[in-house]
Image (cartoon, grey):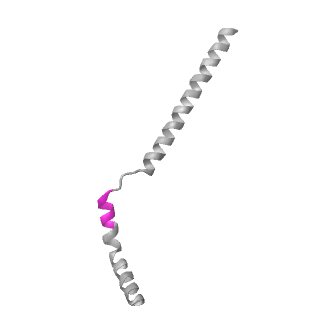
Amino acid sequence: MEKRLGDIHQDIRAFISLQKDARREDIESACLRDLRVVDPQDDMQRIEESKDELLDDAYKWILRTS
């Protein structure tokens, strides 16, 4: 009986350890996702695609505040 209880205890400890590892990996993945590296090419493309709107808005702002 004690051996079975010892085995159950060990299984529970192993399960808890696996759960902690899985949780740690989830946290690390979320952190890395939040800290993702920005690709300058993506930023350049976004700026180039929206520059006409930015230019129009700049003209409007200058004329409105002059």
Residue at 39% across / 81% down in the picture?
57
**Magenta span: chief secondary structure:** helix
Which residue is nearer to you in this view: 64 or 12? 64
Residue 46 is situated, as x and y percent measured from the top left of the image, at 34, 67
Q: Which residues are magenta?
A: 39-45
Residue 40 in magenta stretch: yes
Q: Quadrant of residue 10?
A: top right
Q: On the picture, is 3 further left or further right than 31?
A: right
Residue 28 is situated, as x and y percent measured from the top left of the image, at 47, 41
Which residue is nearer to you in this view: 59 or 8? 59
Assign the C terminus to one quadrant of the image. Answer: bottom left
Q: Quadrant of residue 61?
A: bottom left
Image: 17 above or below 10: below
Residue at 30% across / 59% down in the picture?
40
Residue 62 in magenta stretch: no
The extreme front residue here reads 66
Assign the N terminus to one quadrant of the image. Answer: top right
Residue at 30% across / 65% down in the picture?
44
Image: 26 above or below 13: below
Image: 39 above or below 15: below
Residue 49 is situated, as x and y percent measured from the top left of the image, at 33, 72
Q: Quadrant of residue 45?
A: bottom left
Residue 34 is situated, as x and y percent measured from the top left of the image, at 45, 51
Q: On the picture, is 21 further left or further right than 36?
A: right
